[in-house]
Amino acid sequence: MQTNAENTNAQQPAPSALERRLDLSVAIADLDKDVDARLKRMGKNVKLPGFRPGKVPANIVRQQYGDQARHEALNEAIDRAFGVAVVEAKLRVAGYPRIEAKQTESTTHVEFSAVFEVYPEVKLGDMSAAEVERPVLEVTDAEVDKTLEILRKQRIRYEAVDRAAAKEDRVVIDFLGKKDGEPFQGGQATDYPFVLGQGMMLADFETAVEGLKAGESKTFEMTFPEDYFAKELAGQKVSFEITVKKVSGPIMPEVDAEFAKTLGVADGDIAKMREEITGNLKREVKKRILGKVKDQVMEAIIKANPIDIPNALVEMEIHRLMENARNDMEQRGMKVKDFPIQPEWFAEQAKRRVTLGLVLAELVKEKELQAKPEQVKAIVEEAAESYEHPEEVVRWYYAQPQRLQEIEGVAIEDNVVSYVLSVAKVTDKAVAFDELMGQQQPA
């Protein structure tokens, strides 16, 4: 329990509709007995210069450790009193209470107030008015061909050519930028490679490079965009001196046995390769459609079930999200201490997650949407299909029950989605492959 008995003037968040206050009291006589017992136990192990262990006089032990013993005894007494009070009041406490000392004239009791929040009462709203648009897409040979084209582009190689640079060529250049006749920071590079037409450089810069052959140079002027990230260059007119050192043209691989082998088809069978791509695409399309439907369902649930949420739970969720962000940054090799993460960045996300958590818990309970063993097994087996040895993946999940917890969460979400779709107004809408897949990155 987090107590504030000694500091009642600490700044606290604005009270919520879920805030409650309980008065607590601790008998001074009982507190004194507990302090004496603690000091007696401490005395058996106290080591002080000039005394044998356990032989330190009681008055010295009290002088050295009296405040610590009283603090511990008081906190435990308040814990017990608070626990009894909330049980008697039949309250579900959210987070930790704030303990405030009360000024009284009592000579027999120390009195406090516990300020805390409770979980809201969730009364489920009517989901029949919810509207969900479900994307529909059938994977055909056309989608497989598009995916093959993407896979080919991902495996492009470049060979040097003796001609002027054009879009999709890979060039290697030296460049020097000047502003008011002086080089500026970040405006110089040697042996800098990039592919024309991919937007790696500003459009005016790429246009100036196009048409040059290896060994040719050029000086040109350009103006940085007004919204350029480097503020000192935004909207500024500069000049660049460039020298093209190498031009390489793209060569896309043919869809043949060697290409199939690069995709993991050991015998190079093209038909088998297409079959595997089709299977992967169907799983990915199913996953993305479910994701879009699930997003709409969750928004509909929030809209239909407005509730007050405890500030304490939101704060806890913010800290959890911040910790996840720090861990993610560290895994990417970033120095977290040099990047101050602000709690307000995660406030809205935390509120949404807490709201959904509270409503979904009640929905699952009331509609009996708990995960069933056969559902969990089906999800595990489907996830394992994309691995070379799926049976080993299945065994890994079932080797330790805690590994199935995340899968059980997915099954519960699927049950929630299925329930909402069964009562809501659902409209199927055909969706284009490119629209659904977005920036597709096939494996």
Image: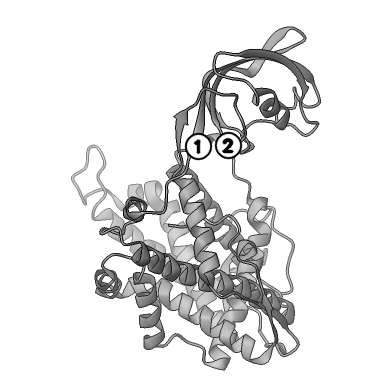
Residue 29 at least partly seen: no
Query: Mark 1 to mark 2: distance in Å?
Result: 7 Å
The crowding category of the residue bearing disc 2, from other C-alpha atoms within 10 Å (few below 14, some 14 to 19, many at least 20), is some
**In percent of the image, x 63 and y 51: which residue is there?**
343
First-in-chain label (1 vs 2)? 2
Left or right relative to 315: residue 258: left
User: Compared with residue 270, is residue 219 higher up or lower down, i.e. above or below?
Assistant: above
Kind of residue sitting beneath label 1: Pro
Left or right relative to 59: residue 389: left
Q: Are marks 1 and 2 in contact (CB under 8 Å)?
A: yes
Whole-percent x, y for residue 22 in the image: 64, 75
Left or right relative to 47: residue 355: right
**In percent of the image, x 40 and y 47: which residue is there?**
63
The number of callouts visible is 2
Quarter of the image containing the C terminus? bottom left
**In percent of the image, x 61 and y 31: which residue is there?**
166
Along the line of sight, which residue is nearer the eye, 114 or 356? Answer: 356
Kind of residue sitting beneath label 2: Glu
Whole-percent x, y for residue 271 in the image: 36, 66
> Circle 2 sits on which residue?
168
Along the line of sight, which residue is nearer the eye, 234 or 328? Answer: 234
> Circle 1 sits on which residue?
250
Quarter occupied by residue 12: bottom right
The crowding category of the residue bearing disc 1, from other C-alpha atoms within 10 Å (few below 14, some 14 to 19, many at least 20), is some
